[in-house]
Image: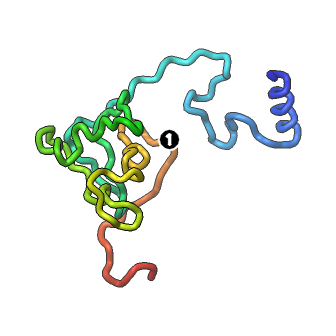
Amino acid sequence: MKKQIVTAFALLWMLGGTVGTAVGEGVVSERGNVGLEEEVPVPEAKQYAKDGNVLPRDYVQQPPLIPHKVEGYIISKKSNKCLSCHSWANAKESMATKISQTHFEDRDKNVLANVSARRYFCTQCHVPQVNAPPLVDNTFKPVTAISGSGAGQ
């Protein structure tokens, strides 16, 4: 198998394709510009935002960002760790944000007694944030206000 992979990479290189880090083009892996056999130091662990701080949203209808670590949270069809704090029953006591009323609607806008199955797996939309620098440059600018001139104009 290893011979086949090496042969495929050699063939790509001979045909003018690029494989791995292209130093001349400014593309560098997260490991830096080092060979695969070289040892690199373990990167510093990233720090999560302090729990309780609401993180700003960058666009209309952006799902709220998670301002805390979720490593080890179990979200399965039988259990959802997020609901232990964010459910309507527990949010006040845990001082957490309540899940939105929209999470209690099915796709036809019927109101449900429990969280909709399509909104149950929180980390499909909501993601935790750390103090890491961006991996690529980004020139995105959030909208500061929505104009009343109508959508799509």
Q: Residue at x 26, y 51 (%)?
A: 99
Which residue is at the front of the view, 87 or 38?
87
Image location (x, y in percent) of residue 1: 81, 23
Res. 100 image quadrant: bottom left
Which residue is at the front of the view, 88 or 139?
88
Res. 46 image quadrant: top left
Q: Residue at x 26, y 54 (%)?
A: 113
Q: Residue at x 29, y 36 (%)?
A: 68
Image location (x, y in percent) of residue 57: 32, 55
Q: Is residue 79 left or right of residue 139?
A: left
Which residue is at the front of the view, 58 or 82?
82
Badge 1 is on which residue? Answer: 135
Q: Secondary structure at mark 1?
A: loop
Q: Residue at x 80, y 28 (%)?
A: 5
Q: Residue furthest left?
A: 93
In this rendering, is residue 35 above or below 153? above
Which residue is at the front of the view, 148 or 69?
69
Image location (x, y in percent) of residue 114: 29, 51
The residue carrying pointer 1 sits among few (fewer than 14), some (14 to 19) or many (20 or more) residues within 10 Å by Cα, namely few
Amino acid at the residue labelled 1: Leu
Q: Is residue 46 left or right of residue 87?
A: right
Res. 37 image quadrant: top right
The answer, for residue 131, to whether it is visible in the render is no
Quadrant housing the C terminus: bottom left
